[in-house]
Image: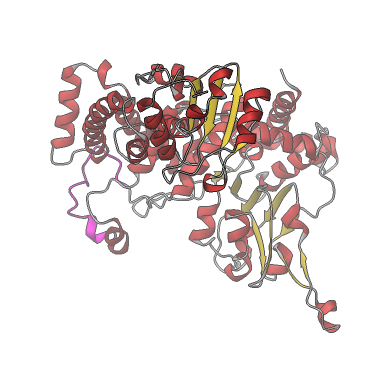
Amino acid sequence: MTREFQIVRMLVDHLKQLVHLPENATPTKERIIHAFVAAVITRSHIILHGPPGCAKSTIVKLVAKAFGIEGGLWRVNGTLGTREEDLVGGLDLVALTCHRREVFYAPFVDAPIRLLDEANRINEFATSPLLPLLGEGEARIGGTDYKKVPKRFTAFTINPPEPGQGTFDLTKPLRDRMDLEMHFPDIGFEELERVLENNETSRDDLVQAMPVLGTPADLFAIQHMVEAIPVAPEAITAIGLYFEATRSCKKDAKAELRNFPACCAECEMAESSFPCSKVTPLSPRAGISAKNLAKGMAFLRRAPEAGKSEVDEIFPFVLSHRVSFPNQAIDNLRTHVFSFFATLQAEVNYAFQLLTAPEHLQEEELKQARARAAEKNGNPLVKKVLMLQRTRARLNDAGEQLKKQLAGMNAPELKKTVTKSGLTMAERQLVERMILARKLVHLTVNEDTLKHQPFRDLFTSPEGQPYFDAAAWDDVAWDGKIGQGSLLGGLDMQYRESILSVQFDDAEQADAFSERLRRAKGDFTLLCPYEQAGLRPDLEKAGILAATITTTTTIPEEAP
């Protein structure tokens, strides 16, 4: 067990002891703590929503204490008077009196973690500079001054809005830049007893009960480790299905949202099994948030990669602040999000099974899926998956035919192949490696042949200019050094262990030169570029047969 994992594990344990939430809440206390820590170690931006006194700010302060982050400059208390200068920075007024234009950046920008308390008490004009800070990592002041800032864990706390209390709703663009939202429920009698006990023990300062587990450097190291965790293809597929599920309405989503609920009275989806709830279609940022947070869950579970189960665990938190339920009477805890997600997840799991493992399904099950999609109130997600499945089958067939032709293609044909459908991303990357390998021409030749002028004369450009001068040839023949030619700024040539390698700037030039060597007479053997580049194992694994071209001829001796 690494030191970094031990720190995170102890952080989770101490938060469970110090933060008192109802054990039977929706979501559960353990799920809230795990999702919150996943947000911390993935440098995510989180909205903490709930009534006053439910430990929203406290849980962030506990994390700051755990990593030895001292002082309060990382925390801003939102009020109606909070300004842009408090969040990002502004012009130095003292410098302006001396006719100098200087800017300063607020401590909030560079803090290891950031807490914006009572974020909904700040008007949208003051919060607008947070958009580039949270989205692109740019602290902008005015139209000319900005600096890049690494992504930091950022928490917004929000109390339920009350009439006449001077609160604002976060704008949609700002919400979309927040990775997840978490709702802290009100505590009950049992939790209140523990809070009072902690209060007596800690003398009104619960943060003192959290030991220092590491340093800010440890926090950054953990975040870098989590960032390097791979994401399984099944996780990407699951995120795509959740993404598609929010766009699966049969009608124009914008028109429905504008005219709701009148337009839904006769909607054919009204009685469908699919949970059509007028969710706001997710933006690509939601998919990126889910992917990154799934890495955090994988780290907590000590999993080698982030898979579908980690996506399922974190996705309702990603969904929470991005959806609206105008046809649902829900309370401030928004527990309906998890009720809705349970139904949505069942549909996504069904579609995931159809998409990823159709060969394991019985024909009867596939027939039922097609019938389910074809009925009047059919599941639009299943329809989409069945259509995608047929498209993939066609592309796979086309890809198999294409792969059989790759070994015999020249460089221009390979370049065209990279943009064609039918090949996977990994196969396209392999084709690009094949093109790079084709820039090198390799042949076996002995040192005596290197000294023959007829052999050297083969190394000329189409215009008749020699690639290499006599001195370069002598260097190669006697010392195996790299020589520089004259065409297009020069070619590299190296002779080592009886193999002469010539590197061209373009694969097409190398192909033309190889063809000249094949037609020539000489005591040399032209080698397969894929073999020399070490691509054969990958080509064999991908089902591509790379043909080794061999030409052996004898060149006449020089005249005495």
Q: Position of residue 128 (x, y in %)?
A: 59, 66
Q: From what the image shows, is residue 504 above or below residue 52?
A: above
Q: Position of residue 369 (x, y in %)?
A: 19, 28
Q: Position of residue 521 (x, y in %)?
A: 39, 23
Residue at 16% x, 19% y: name it: 364
Q: Which residues are magenta?
A: 260-276
Q: What sort of colour scheme is used for the picture?
A: secondary structure
- Which residue is at the front of the view, 550 or 98? 550
Q: Position of residue 525 (x, y in %)?
A: 44, 18
Residue 170 appears in the figure: yes
Furthest toward the front, the residue is: 560
Task: Answer whether residue 263 is magenta in the image.
Answer: yes
- Which residue is at the front of the view, 477 or 197? 477
The reply, left or right, for residue 64 in relation to residue 497 is right
Quadrant of image for the N terminus: top right
The reply, left or right, for residue 325 in relation to residue 88 is left
Of helix, strand and loop, which mostly describes the magenta segment?
Answer: loop
